[in-house]
């Protein structure tokens, strides 16, 4: 819906009446939702955040565009930055409108300065609790995925800490416990030498479906080809190329008409038939001659897969993480029940550390997006918690054209709950791998300032990437905080150079 620019301003009295009605409605609806949530919240400090989230959801289920535009001519357009302080922001606007029209009706009290910015301070506290303190010119943390060499070269960690790394990520899909332990030992020693604190995140692999085998060994794919996804390779099964899935229990859950994406969306197809051994699909999207490779990921965006987010290997890795790590990265989490499952496992192996162990939920599917508020309550109501926007799988699952929109909504929901967000997947990817950034990824890195942490993957130029990211984030924080422009003085030009000094 396109909104017409108003030609006649709406009176302050009419706006005041509308806002008072809106406040009454969202207070009633938000409080009802908060009362449902409250029994799940064990940390008293999270209660104001949960209530603010409940009110924010009640507010944003409404289309407020016309009201926002009507407020702008009166200099009251701040509803667009209401995430961290729903009621204080509404009350501030209501009281200003009341002063404009000399309202005699009873108004909610104007919020004191401390209450107005309480949400911002709570987000800073929650971020520090999860990622630790930060030093220097920026508030956004930098997370770096540790390469295998970090287990043998202590200088690697020293260098990265001095450049600005604040959190180290260990991908449990790679290396082994002995290597991870050496990485962490070197990192702790480097932190002591440099005086730079650094949290350790261990990222569980989760039930990621991948190609397990192909027949024939080399398969080149073209648009319109038929492929068979089967429980077991059968060379005598005809001329159609076959491949198997690392999680064969998925196949009975698939249905005709559903989409299948392969290799991060490089190959796409649709299921055209199904039998007891598997499914057959027609390729609808691919680069001509694209190779079907073992270990490449599979995505089933139309399928409501019933999979436990914790595999047997995840449970083994979790026992290690509870001993050595500060934060657990949770893959394929899709519900509050999934969060509760991890909490039970951490309580079992974490002992006294269980309530202090941080969790970062990786948002990778539409189902996870829909369940995000409930997952936040279940997790942040008990322990330090953050959300990672896992843009790789998420883009494949929801469609690339929706990624930017969903990324924004995740940021808003988390800010309303005062929960930190990790901006992840392919940040400065060309720079990390090739030493030269693309123009677009520099803009992406600048936009990442609206999150609380930015993740870099491993590569030969990751040190250079940390240098550049540190600089970009510090510059952007001077101009922008979340959705709010800071209005720092511009120094790139001077008006007197072109129009003369008055």
Image (cartoon, helix red, strand yellow):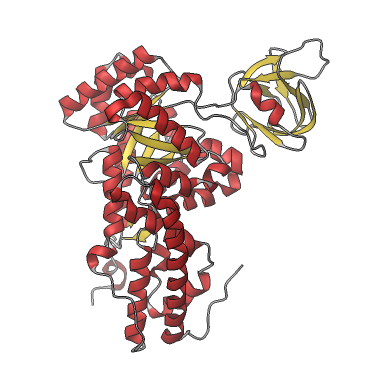
Residue drawn at x 66%, y 22% as measured from the top left: 291
- In the image, residue 360 sits, relative to residue 176, either above or below, namely below
Q: Where residue 473 sits in the image (x, y, percent)?
A: 32, 46
Image quadrant in which you'd find residue 302: top right
- In the image, residue 128 sits, relative to residue 263, either above or below, namely below
Q: How many numbered callouts?
A: 0
Residue 499 in the figure: left or right of residue 255: left
Q: Nearer the viewer, residue 384 or 445?
A: 384
Residue 226 in the figure: left or right of residue 311: right
Q: Where residue 13 sits in the image (x, y, percent)?
A: 42, 86
For the view shown, which residue lies furthest in the right direction? 238
Assign the N terminus to one quadrant of the image.
bottom right
Q: Nearer the viewer, residue 395 or 333?
A: 333
Q: Where residue 192 sits in the image (x, y, percent)?
A: 17, 26
Q: Nearer the viewer, residue 175 or 34?
A: 34
For the view shown, which residue lies furthest in the front direction? 39
Residue drawn at x 47%, y 44% as measured from the top left: 440
Q: Nearer the viewer, residue 299 or 404?
A: 299
Image quadrant in which you'd find residue 285: top right
Residue drawn at x 76%, y 12% as measured from the top left: 234
- In the image, residue 214 sits, relative to residue 134, either above or below, namely above
Decide if residue 1 is in sight here: yes
- In the image, residue 394 sits, relative to residue 102, either above or below, namely above
């Amino acid at each position: 819906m396109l909104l017409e620019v108003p030609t006649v301003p709406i009176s302050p009295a009419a706006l005041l009446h509308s806002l008072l009605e809106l406040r009454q409605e969202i207070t009633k609806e938000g409080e009802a939702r908060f009362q449902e949530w409250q029994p799940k919240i064990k940390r008293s400090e999270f209660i104001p955040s949960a209530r603010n989230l409940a009110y924010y959801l009640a507010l944003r289920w409404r289309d407020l565009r016309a009201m926002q535009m009507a407020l702008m001519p009166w200099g009251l357009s701040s509803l667009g930055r209401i995430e961290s302080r729903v009621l204080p922001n509404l009350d501030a606007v209501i009281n200003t409108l009341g002063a404009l029209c000399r309202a005699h009706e009873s108004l909610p009290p104007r919020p004191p300065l401390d209450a107005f910015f309480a949400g911002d301070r709570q987000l800073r506290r929650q971020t520090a609790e999860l990622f630790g303190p930060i030093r220097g010119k920026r508030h956004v943390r930098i997370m770096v995925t540790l390469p295998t060499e970090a287990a043998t070269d202590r200088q690697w960690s020293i260098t990265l800490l001095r450049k600005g790394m604040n959190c180290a990520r260990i991908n449990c899909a790679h290396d082994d416990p002995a290597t991870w332990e050496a990485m962490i030992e070197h990192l702790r020693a480097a932190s002591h030498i440099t005086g730079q604190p650094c949290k350790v995140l261990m990222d569980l692999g989760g039930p990621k479906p991948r190609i397990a085998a192909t027949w024939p060994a080399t398969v080149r794919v073209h648009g319109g080809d038929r492929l068979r996804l089967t429980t077991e390779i059968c060379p005598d099964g005809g001329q159609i190329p076959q491949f198997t899935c690392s999680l064969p229990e998925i196949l009975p859950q698939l249905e005709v008409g559903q989409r299948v994406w392969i290799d991060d969306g490089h190959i796409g197809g649709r299921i055209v038939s199904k039998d007891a051994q598997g499914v057959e699909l027609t390729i609808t999207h691919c680069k001509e001659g694209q190779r079907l490779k073992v270990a490449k990921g599979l995505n089933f965006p139309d399928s409501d897969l019933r999979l436990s987010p914790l595999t047997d290997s995840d449970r083994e890795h979790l026992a290690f993480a509870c001993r050595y790590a500060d934060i657990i990265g949770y893959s394929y989490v899709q519900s509050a029940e999934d969060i509760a499952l991890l909490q039970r496992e951490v309580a079992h192996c974490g002992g006294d550390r269980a309530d202090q162990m941080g969790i970062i939920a990786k948002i990778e599917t539409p189902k996870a997006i829909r369940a995000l508020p409930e997952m936040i309550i279940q997790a942040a109501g008990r322990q330090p918690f953050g959300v990672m926007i896992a843009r790789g799988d998420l883009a494949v699952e929801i469609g690339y054209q929706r990624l930017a929109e969903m990324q924004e909504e995740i940021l808003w929901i988390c800010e309303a709950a005062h929960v930190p967000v990790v901006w992840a997947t392919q940040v400065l990817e060309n720079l990390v791998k090739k030493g030269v950034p693309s123009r677009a990824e520099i803009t992406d890195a600048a936009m990442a300032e609206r999150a609380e942490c930015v993740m870099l993957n491993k590569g030969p130029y990751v040190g250079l990437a940390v240098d550049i990211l540190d600089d970009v984030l510090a510059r952007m924080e001077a101009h922008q905080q979340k959705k709010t422009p800071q209005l720092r003085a511009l120094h790139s030009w001077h008006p007197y150079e072109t129009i003369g000094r008055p």
